[in-house]
Image (spheres, rainbow, N blue to C red):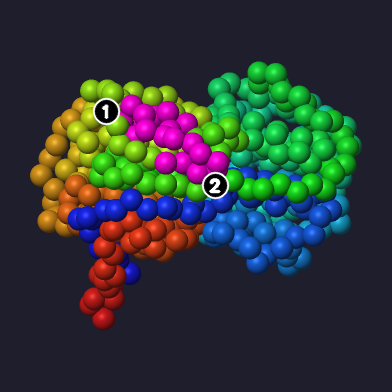
Amino acid sequence: MIYRIGAHTLQPCRIELPPSKSIANRITMLRALSGMPQTTDDAACDDIAAMQHAICNADNIIDIGDAGTAMRFLTAYYASTPGTQHILTGSPRMQQRPIGVLVEALRAAGATITYCSREGFPPLSIRGRQLRGGTIAIKGDISSQFISALQLAAPLMHEGLHLSIMGNIVSRPYIEMTIELMRHFGATVSCRGNSIKVAPQRYTPAAIEIEGDWSAASYWYETVAISRTPMTLTTLQHDSLQGDARVAQYFSQLGVETRYDNGEVTLSPCPVAVKDFTAHLADTPDIAPTIAIACALQGIPFRLTGLDNLPLKECDRIAVLTGEAKKLGFVFTSPKSGTVAWTGNRTTPSQTIPCIDPHSDHRMAMAFAPAALVTGNISIETPCVVAKSYPHFWDDLLRAGFSITPQPDKEEATT
């Protein structure tokens, strides 16, 4: 299936964002570790559903598909749950995403984990036991989810855990989010620079409300910046645990003003404050595609750095972003590792109506969709990929005034 997106007359509307999957997945694990009953009937997206179903699943083989957070968190959860044995696997792309750094750290804490196929990659065979813990060193520049997974399991370790994080830390706000949620469930955690200490103790059951997803909000910032049409977003917090809340700061330079009012955020057009845009996004890499496309569609040259882990996401986001942007006539470059840039260089689009291949990546599909505001029409292949984090994204575009016309993909059209 292909969706053809058109955008001609947008209208202000109120958008109910999905809950933050980053917070929801951490709470799912914290509920399990504190002995609280689990539920599988309130998952707001595929990633949350994968985590919830796996926690409740006693089968020997657990397949989490494309859910990267679930793969990392469940590796630590199963390894630290005495008496269990699982093979943890995922999609073909998941089996290409490295997990060796986390496995080695868990082994250093006493875990029994073996690789079922390729060394350093899923699937994993995990036998659960109480882990010893102690002092462990881990690289900080690959995935913050490795660190969060260890943190979450740490209170159940016999000696607790002292994490010494080596080098730069990517996506540090997600580590801080984990710490705050652990404290909410009664854990004793201290963090100074690159040193995190977690005391051995039992978690305390707790209730918590899950705020809206700031990563999902980024696509509406992009839409407002390009269309100059105000939008209101629900369940967002000014003092959010989510690092991607910084999208408000970035887009204040790109033509969007943010007003907070009792859990709702109103986005309004304002003057663009820069002639070119530069940002270091090591703490917020997920919103890099959105910012890049929003800048290009407004004719604003940009340079985004700190993106060294983007090639390890659902797709190689740097390669896919530069490749698909060329279909819109924008020549993005990656002048060095972890960098995406645009100097304003244009080329003639190869298609009258650009057809974007998101490469099975939800964020690529959603970041490119608002380009219809400039191109008149744009096609998105495999639109179902948005279910990973924002299942009703296309419905919300319709409510805002976009048009969406389903079309058969190339294979369907020839059968």
From this view, report whether residue 276 is shown above or below residue 221.
above
Quarter holding the C terminus is bottom left
Contact flag, marks 1 and 2 (Cβ < 8 Å): no
Question: For the residue carrying disc 1, how many other residues have a C-alpha within 10 Å: few (<14), some (14-19), or many (20+)?
Answer: some
Q: Where residue 310 appears, x then y in whole percent?
A: 44, 38
Magenta-colored stretch includes residue 254:
yes
Q: Residue at x 33, y 27 (%)?
A: 253
> Foreground residue, 296 or 373?
373
Q: Earlier in the sequence, mark 1 or mark 2?
A: 2
Which residue extends farthest front? 261
Which residue extends farthest top? 193
For label 1, the SS is: loop
The region drawn magenta spans 246-266
- Visible in this render: residue 38? yes
Q: Residue at x 39, y 36 (%)?
A: 288
Number of the label disc, if any, that sits on residue 272: 1
Number of the label disc, if any, that sits on residue 92: none
Indicate left or right for 184 with 167 as reference: right
> Foreground residue, 361 or 40?
40
Q: Which residue is mark 2?
A: 235
Q: Where residue 369 appears, x then y in whole percent?
A: 30, 52
Q: Residue at x 19, y 33 (%)?
A: 299
Indicate left or right for 34 with 264 as reference: right
Write down the quadrant of residue 408 in the picture: bottom left
From this view, report whether residue 22 is shown above or below residue 50.
above
Q: Where residue 315 appears, x then y in whole percent?
A: 42, 48
Q: Which residue type does callout 1 highlight?
A: Val
Q: Where residue 11 appears, x then y in whole percent?
A: 29, 53
